[in-house]
Amino acid sequence: MGLTPERVHDAEVFKRTPYVADLKPGGRFVAKDMVEVGGIPFLMNTLLDRGDLHGECITVTGRTIAETMKTVKWNPDKDVVRPAGQPITVNGAITHPVAPHETQCHAHA
């Protein structure tokens, strides 16, 4: 069946995006742990620091992503999200077709 152009694009994104959130099923932590350390903004800030997010994009608040992320503080005592320069792996995942209309992502070491 092969990969559709959309899935090829997904695979390319995964190749250049670091694996920085140590979340299950492959990691040590669950979503509750992520919320306790700052949630998605904490993860977004890490990706912004690496240049993986376009900080100039406007959010629903009317502020840019970069402006919004200025309020997020890094907590070095938390292992749920790794610093931008110390990812778990340098690329996040590989994708392969599991069903005709699905993509499954797997973290790899």
Image (spheres, rainbow, N blue to C red):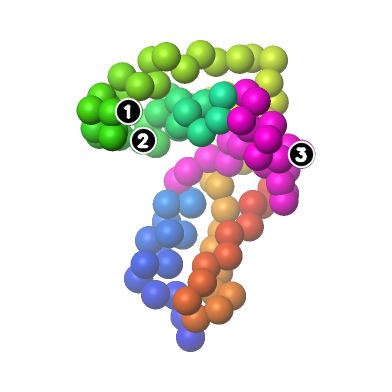
Q: CA distance from mark 2 to mark 3?
A: 25 Å
State whether residue 1 is above or below residue 11.
Answer: below
Q: Is residue 86 visible?
A: no
Which dot marks residue 53?
2
Crowding around mark 1 (Cα neighbors within 10 Å: few <14, some 14 to 19, many 20+) is many
Residue 98's spot in the image, x, y percent? 59, 75
Q: Residue at x 39, y 36 (%)?
A: 52
Q: Is residue 58 left or right of residue 89?
A: left
* Label 2 with label 3: CB-CB less than 8 Å: no
Which dot marks residue 28?
3
Q: For the stretch drawn in magenta, what is the main secondary structure?
A: loop
Q: Quadrant of residue 28?
A: top right
Q: Residue at x 25, y 24 (%)?
A: 63
Q: Residue at x 51, y 33 (%)?
A: 40
**Residue 29, magenta (yes or no):** yes
Q: Amino acid under label 3?
A: Arg
* Label 2 with label 1: CB-CB less than 8 Å: yes
* Mark toward the start of the polypeptide (2 vs 1): 2
Q: Amino acid under label 2?
A: Leu
Point out the stretch of residues depicted in magenta: 16-37
Which dot marks residue 37?
none
Q: Amino acid under label 1?
A: Ile
**Residue 32, magenta (yes or no):** yes
* Label 3 with label 1: CB-CB less than 8 Å: no
State whether residue 1 is above or below residue 52.
Answer: below
Residue 82's spot in the image, x, y percent? 61, 28
Which dot marks residue 65?
1
Q: CA distance from mark 2 to mark 1?
A: 8 Å
Crowding around mark 2 (Cα neighbors within 10 Å: few <14, some 14 to 19, many 20+) is some
Q: Residue at x 63, y 57 (%)?
A: 106
* Mark toward the start of the polypeptide (3 vs 1): 3
State whether residue 92 is above or below residue 9.
Answer: above
